[in-house]
Structures are given as C-alpha cells and as structure tokens.
C-alpha cells in the first residue's frame, strides 16, 4: 500500500490498512500493465498515490495529473465530496458551535494550511455563526487535535470524515462529541506524477469526482 513508488498512506490506519493494501496492489498492476517502470524510473520517487488538495493546487504546472478522488461514502454527500466534523469534549464541552467565544474558549487546528482542519473550519464558523476562531492552538495532526479536545485542552476542533473513521477506539475517541458538520467539499486527490517534464499547459482539471466505499 505504501511500498516503492505507490504512496497510499494519507489515511493509513488499522481500519483502512487492508483496503489500501488491495488498492495499492491493483494500482501497481494497472500502471505496470500500461508500461510504467515503477522499479526503474520511479524506484526512488513517487509515481501515484494520495496528496492533499493544497499540494496539488500549489505544485509546479504539469507535475501531477489528477486521476480520482477517494472518500468514505456517505448518503448525505455527493460522490467525491466529504465534510469536516466539528467536535467538542463529551465532558462539559460546548453545547453548540454558536456558543464558541474566542475570548473564553480555545479552538485547535492541525495545520494552518489544512483545508479540513483549519480553512473550512474557520470559514464555516464565520459564515454560520459570525464567529472568529481567535488565537488557535496548533496540534500538527487531526488525531492530536481530537485528543486535545477529548482531554479538554481545547474546546473545539474540526476533523475530516475519513480521518475520523480511521481514529482508533479508546479514551480519546470516547471523550469527544460530534457537534456539527461543515459544508461539503471535494476530497483528497489521488494523482499520478507525469512521466515527462512539465509541458506548457496547466495540469488536467478533473470534471468528475469518484467516491469509494469505506
């Protein structure tokens, strides 16, 4: 699933390991059947796999080509879209996201440039409640944000649905409560690196997103 030039480790966790192992083998077989020399030209590099939407959007022109979007299926969302879950502590947490007061409460984000953990989180709170997140804490990872909420180090966090489903069961997961969901948005890109040098045109723009079952 993550060996060699195939990188499918963005959502790698115990609940997803078997599925990504199968998908990785299939992806390798398809690429090799189509003449991609994974053990040669891509032996020390990246041929195909997951990247964050920010990485894809800010990469040099022509470096990557979009293949598909991978998400956890939900009847509530369009295919290829996911949302972030707003979570608070199950023990004395906020009654509603609208109760968040940046003067008294602390929000935690994983990274400043994260779509699901910060950008859409802040945009949703502003649009839905007219509230700024204020001086946020930074955890460095979705699951660390959830642990901080569960332990009441922070009052509110956002985590994308796929990462949430990969969270291990235990004290941290039992200690949080889902409050609300942000507006849905396109999910992570599954992309393939171009085999040749970048051309003059921009990377191919996807017309459709494709969801896969969890």
Image (cartoon, rainbow, N blue to C red):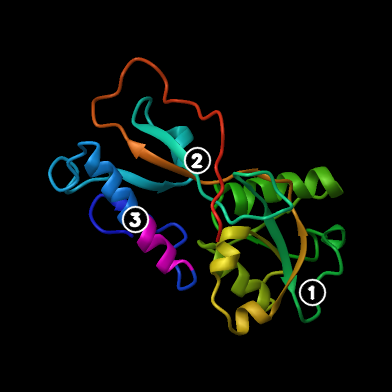
Q: Which of the numbered marks, if any, corresponds to residue 54?
A: 2
Residue 211: where, in percent of width, then height?
56, 48
What residue do we see at 18% from left, 48% from top?
Answer: 44
Q: Say whether residue 21 is magenta.
A: yes
> From this viewpoint, which residue is outermost toward the bottom?
171
Query: Circle 1 sits on which residue?
Result: 93
Q: Nearer the viewer, mark 2 or mark 1?
A: 2
The quarter of the rendered structure image containing the C terminus is bottom right
Could you tell which of marks 2 and 3 lies nearer the N-terminus? 3
Residue to which mark 3 is pinned:
24
**In the figure, is residue 105 to the left or right of 164?**
right
Q: Quadrant of the N terminus?
A: bottom left
Identify the secondary structure beneath mark 3. Answer: helix
- How packed mark 2 is, by other alpha carbons closer than 10 Å (few <14, some 14-19, many 20 or more), is few
Magenta stretch bounds? 16-23
Judge whether 130 appears above or below 175 on screen.
Answer: above
Cα–Cα span, label 2 and label 3? 23 Å
SS for dot 1: loop
Q: Is residue 72 magenta?
A: no
Q: Residue 100 location in percent, x, y?
A: 82, 61
Q: Residue at x 49, y 71 (%)?
A: 15
Which residue lies most toward the front here?
Answer: 33
Q: Nearer the viewer, mark 2 or mark 3?
A: 3
Residue 83 at x, y = what percent? 67, 51
Depth check, mark 1 against mark 3: the one in front is 3
Q: Whole-Å distance between the Cαs marked 2 and 1? A: 31 Å
Instruction: Look at the picture and state if 190 lies above or below 181.
Output: above
Q: Residue furthest top?
A: 200
Q: Give the dominant element type of the magenta stretch: helix, strand or loop.
A: helix
């Amino acid at each position: 699933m993550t060996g060699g030039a195939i990188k499918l480790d963005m959502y790698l966790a115990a609940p997803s390991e078997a599925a990504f192992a199968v998908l990785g083998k299939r992806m390798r077989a398809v690429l090799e059947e189509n003449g991609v020399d994974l053990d040669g030209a891509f032996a020390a590099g990246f041929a195909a796999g997951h990247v964050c939407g920010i990485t894809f959007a800010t990469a040099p022109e022509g470096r990557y080509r979009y293949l598909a979007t991978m998400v956890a299926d939900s009847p509530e969302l369009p295919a290829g879209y996911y949302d972030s879950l707003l979570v608070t502590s199950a023990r004395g947490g906020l009654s509603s996201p609208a109760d968040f007061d940046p003067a008294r409460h602390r929000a935690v984000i994983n990274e400043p440039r994260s779509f699901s953990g910060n950008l859409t989180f802040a945009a949703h709170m502003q649009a839905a409640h007219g509230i700024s997140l204020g001086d946020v804490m930074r955890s460095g990872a979705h699951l660390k944000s959830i642990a901080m909420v569960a332990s009441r180090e922070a009052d509110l966090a956002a985590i994308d649905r796929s990462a949430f489903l990969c969270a291990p069961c235990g004290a941290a997961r039992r200690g949080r409560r889902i409050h609300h969901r942000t507006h849905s948005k396109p999910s992570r890109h599954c992309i393939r690196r171009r085999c040749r040098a970048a051309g003059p045109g921009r990377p191919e723009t996807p017309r459709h997103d494709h969801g896969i079952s969890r």
